[in-house]
Amino acid sequence: MSEIREPKQKRSIETKEIIAKAGFKLFCEKGYHGTNTIEISKYAGVSTGAVYSYFKDKRDIYIAAFDQYIGSFSNLLFEKLKSLQQPLDLSVFVDEWIAFYIDLFGTSEQALARLRIMMLEDEDINRHFCNFENAYALKITEILIHNGVISDNSLEKVFACCTLVDALSREKSVYPHEQLNFDVLKCQIKKAILILLST
Amino acid sequence: MSEIREPKQKRSIETKEIIAKAGFKLFCEKGYHGTNTIEISKYAGVSTGAVYSYFKDKRDIYIAAFDQYIGSFSNLLFEKLKSLQQPLDLSVFVDEWIAFYIDLFGTSEQALARLRIMMLEDEDINRHFCNFENAYALKITEILIHNGVISDNSLEKVFACCTLVDALSREKSVYPHEQLNFDVLKCQIKKAILILLST
Amino acid sequence: MSEIREPKQKRSIETKEIIAKAGFKLFCEKGYHGTNTIEISKYAGVSTGAVYSYFKDKRDIYIAAFDQYIGSFSNLLFEKLKSLQQPLDLSVFVDEWIAFYIDLFGTSEQALARLRIMMLEDEDINRHFCNFENAYALKITEILIHNGVISDNSLEKVFACCTLVDALSREKSVYPHEQLNFDVLKCQIKKAILILLST
Amino acid sequence: MSEIREPKQKRSIETKEIIAKAGFKLFCEKGYHGTNTIEISKYAGVSTGAVYSYFKDKRDIYIAAFDQYIGSFSNLLFEKLKSLQQPLDLSVFVDEWIAFYIDLFGTSEQALARLRIMMLEDEDINRHFCNFENAYALKITEILIHNGVISDNSLEKVFACCTLVDALSREKSVYPHEQLNFDVLKCQIKKAILILLST
DNA sequence: GATGAATGAGAATTCATTCAT
DNA sequence: AATGAATGAATTCTCATTCAT
């Protein structure tokens, strides 16, 4: 097995990123099993050989692809939430959280859902990403504690809220249930979140 | 393409069920892509040919396997909830709902999570099972309306509750987050459900 | 391997014939490789087991099926030709030959073409049927010699005529060539046959 | 489905041709159904994967293989016939036609017979090659009209002649009938052709 | 004798990965 | 370093034939 290059030069780093981005695009669109490495290399405009000089194997591309995504997802969300005016208005915070999460979720449609799949299918991928959800909930928790919104059982409360926000965004883009009215659902979920965080 | 046998005789029906159960076991354990038809036939103690005389293809085994599961899951849950004493005590109802859901979820560890994966990966499977979730939420809604617990926006409220119950049970068995205290989470979720349904 | 039954009783003989006829129908329609033994047994209304108690294997069904066909084909053709009025009018003879061959060929569309395929694909089948064409040409030759139409090089002449009649009937039913006018072709072929046989 | 490579580089073109030639050899020898793709790849000295990177499926190999054959068959025959001295001596023309057809037919024994089989078995293959026979007869017709040999009903006359030449060559190599004397047959067929074309 | 469920070798095809050029 | 042709194990599915009931 040939050495995997850890790119130092600018051009190499760019190539590696281009491949990861191509992978991300295709994995989101067609899933891990529906995407093959030749497609990825074609989409990235490089040779198959090149892919394997930057990545150990297909899974490695997957991890890199979703690392990029998760990283920018988190950063964008936190920046957005931190930028809210002080003192924090909880209702506005929740609105922004929901709006932003749905927006991010929507841009790369099924990314998060796809990731959960792979975490379930592959132990290594699970190990790699299992801390992301913790980190996300922790960051939200931090902000809320910092602003005096919650104090006790804070992580559990926030986790339940995260679940609701995620379900809402899934309802928006991936699995819509015909009988549900989205706006009513959003309103109920916001209500539940506010109560969870206030009591 | 050879005809698929619709078994009428007892022995045939049993064989078909044995194969579906073997498929269910392996699909839950190792996922759809991690399981091959030869493994399924070996585990079921039949030949590969037998598998393909009862099922059109691998996906057909998957659907049959999860149909069985979903069917018994639903039946057991509804029987349990209906058997609760009248007049309905909402707190007891929620406790039982959670307890039972977790219990059922736990027995075939990742079944529901696996199913959601395949619904995302495969349109036919999605079509086949997309009504299950609706049916489940509707049944719960019916019980609650019948007992005068909720009236307006009932389906959306129940859907949010279902999300929370499901997240809790996932937390129990599939994706545990280290920093979370399960009992605290359960308590918070129960609280959120009670409030959602009462207001 | 279980014994192949050589049916003596009337019912058995009938069953064997029914299976062979079912095979013939399906082999003509879909070819040898496009037909499987289960289809044959279903079409014949018997069990797969029954098929294998009358026939050694699939090829054996094929041979029996085409034996029946070839037998009745020959008989009908010879009866027809023999029934022509004496003294033999060669032009009428050729007309009847062509008309009857096309008619027989047409009723089980591709039977003869299918048989030639299998004779090429399978040595045993080739051995079994290779004498049919000889027999057919010989019978025609006999009639013509008997009527004083030909004397020298008779078999070769008749063989060439058979080739032309066969090509004409194929043109009618299996492989039509767009640019050809069938009636013109028929006229030319009749002319060629008459010349071949007269000189 | 992975993309089929349309080879541009010399090495690739060669590989594709080697595979098609291997296929041709085996298909002629053992028929389409008697040849599997692993044999083809082994005979061609490449991997199974290579076969499927140049060809969509087994049928695609068949078509390519016979395209090559038909192409060179036609070209050689027409060159030969065109090279005959002017003014055209019909008797010589027919002799050369027969000699060359038999020679070409003989080098890849059953190729043409095999092709007719597949045209009967497979609609796509039929569509692909159905014009070859027309083209062949048309070219011969052209030459004969150009030389003033025939004028009316030319295509039908030539078609009948083609049938006879083909039957003769089949008699030489594939289906010999014991009772027939080949030279006598050839002589009779030549006579029939000359008369057909002259009247 | 009859049935049709079961067998399992064999076929076509795919795709992650390697390596000669 | 880059390329993309080649590899071949693995997978899904078929079907002639057998044999327990």
Image: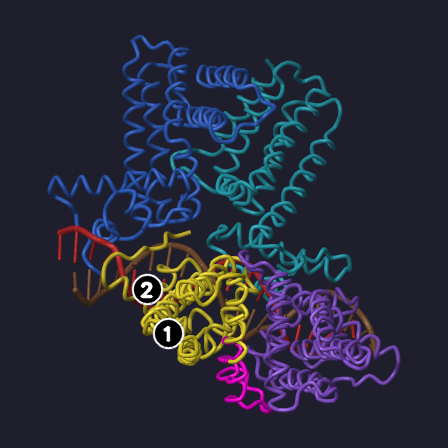
Chain colours: A purple, B yellow, C blue, D cyan, E red, F brown
Front position in the image: A60 or D134 = A60
Check the residue under mark 1 and report the chain it is in: B
Magenta residue check for B183: yes
Are circles 1 and 2 on residues that touch, CB within 8 Å? no
Q: Tell me which amino acid carries mark 2.
A: Lys
Q: Is residue E11 above or below residue A104?
A: above
* Label drawn at residue B155: none
* Label drawn at residue B16: 2
Number of labels in the image equals: 2
Across and down, in percent, residue D125 comes to 56, 42
Q: Are marks 1 and 2 on the same chain?
A: yes
In the structure shown, which secondary structural element does the residue marked by tag 1 occupy? Answer: helix
Decide which of tag 1 and tag 2 comes sooner along the chain.
2
User: Looking at this rendering, what residue extends furthest in the left direction?
Assistant: C9
Res. C84 visible in picture = yes
Identified at 44% across, 33% down, the residue is D181
Magenta residue check for C71: no
Front position in the image: D140 or C26 = C26
Across and down, in percent, residue C164 comes to 48, 25
Tell me which segment is drawn in magenta.
B164-190
Front position in the image: C18 or C155 = C18
- Mark 2 closeness class: few <14, some 14–19, many ≥20 residues within 10 Å: many
Horizontal side of C35 relative to A67 (left or right) equals: left
Q: Tell me which amino acid carries mark 1.
A: Lys
Residue at the disc numbered 1: B42
Across and down, in percent, residue C198 comes to 45, 14
Marks 1, 2: nearer the viewer: 2
What is the magenta segment's predominant secondary structure?
A: helix
Front position in the image: A4 or D173 = A4
The image quarter containing residue A101 is: bottom right
